Image: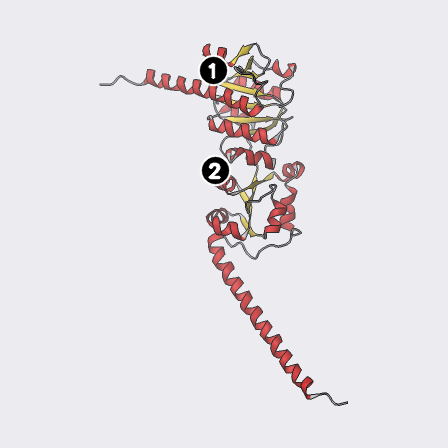
Amino acid sequence: MAVPAGRRRAAPAGQRQHEQRQHEQRQHEQRQQEQRQQDGGRTGSAGPEVTSARSPRVRAARRLAKRAFRRQARLFLAEGPQAVAEALASGATVTELFLTRQARARHGELAAEAARRGAAVHAVSGDVMAELAQTVTPQGLLAVCRFVDVPLARLAEASPRLVVILASIRDPGNAGTVLRTADATGADGVIFSDASVDPYNSKCVRASAGSLFHLPVVVGVPLAESVAALRGAGLQVLAADGGAALTLDEVTHASRLGQPTAWLFGNEAWGLPGALLALADEAVAVPIYGRAESLNLAAAAAVCLYASARALRAGSVTARAQISPPAG
């Protein structure tokens, strides 16, 4: 049976279409390559976009959402431009950086700086970033960082004047807020006792708003050991306790806060049990002047730390005035 002429002509037409598609594909790939090269100059060679959450690098980063894997690798996730910028500015080790196309356009300088410091920079799709991020609305930028905590001995040997000890704090948002407050008041360090939340929990990292990278953090030390080390370094230990007979006003008026102090804060729900209160030199209550039942942990910590910071700064100013030679 003869093949119709029309069909004989169809083969070359199909071949031409196939060749045209190949040509268009090569042009598309060339444009993508040129774009990647241009982006690489700004972002540290982010490379082709990762679109699968099954990518080995993505899967490894996702594992860091769990504390056991964080501790094993001594790595954690810092999400958002502020956290990434603070990590880089502090000199913390950023091993990897994941970013979306939109974040690359807005924060290319952060990716370039991360790459300059040796971090592997990965461009990822929005869906992959949603898998990596621990927030409802990801900001498109997420870094893998090495742990930044220091040994207790290093903190104690640095002649600290204001330190926070967190005992059995379970809420990561509260812990991160206290860490941020400690940073704001000029504290010299924060100790997360062995029964407290992990400071590298993503919610704690976010709540700290970058303060995790600003001051020494000690992790996992038994409370009694922390208290002994700080007392040995010359600090008094005050425990914040809503039921204490001694108030913060009385401690302030007695000029007790002008000396180096470690503030001990307990669990959000049940505070500090008697055995832990016994470790402190004094238990101190934040006075309630109105009708509120109590203050939450973050608010009480802010009041206590700012009271200490003011007293310590006033003492420093007085000491400098006494040392300075008279004018003329």
First along the sequence among labels 1 and 2: 2
Residue at the disc numbered 2:
90
Give the Cα separation between the discs numbered 1 and 2: 30 Å
Q: Nearer the viewer, residue 262 or 10?
A: 10
Instruction: Give percent across and percent down for residue 57.
Output: 62, 49
Could you say which quadrant of the image residue 270 lies in? top right
Q: Quadrant of residue 192?
A: top right
Amino acid type of the residue tagged 1 in the rendering: Leu
Residue 257 badge: 1
Q: Quadrant of the C terminus?
A: top left
Which residue occupies the foreground of this view, 304 or 274?
Answer: 304
Q: Could you tell me if the residues under marks 1 and 2 are in contact, i.e. CB atoms within 8 Å?
A: no
Can the viewer see residue 216 in this picture? no
x, y (%) of residue 33?
A: 52, 62
- Residue 184 vs residue 258, the one in the foreground: 184
Colouring chosen for the image of the structure: secondary structure
Determine the secondary structure under disc 1: helix
Please report the residue visible at 61 percent of the width from the left and 47 percent of the height from the top. 130
Up the image or down, 165 lies above or below 22; here it is above
Q: Quadrant of the N terminus?
A: bottom right
- Which residue: 60% across, 78% down? 16
Residue 59 screen position, x and y as percent: 65, 48
Residue 295 x/y as whole percent: 57, 21
Which residue sits at x=56%, y=23%? 165
Instruction: Relative to 135, say whether 319 is above or below.
Output: above
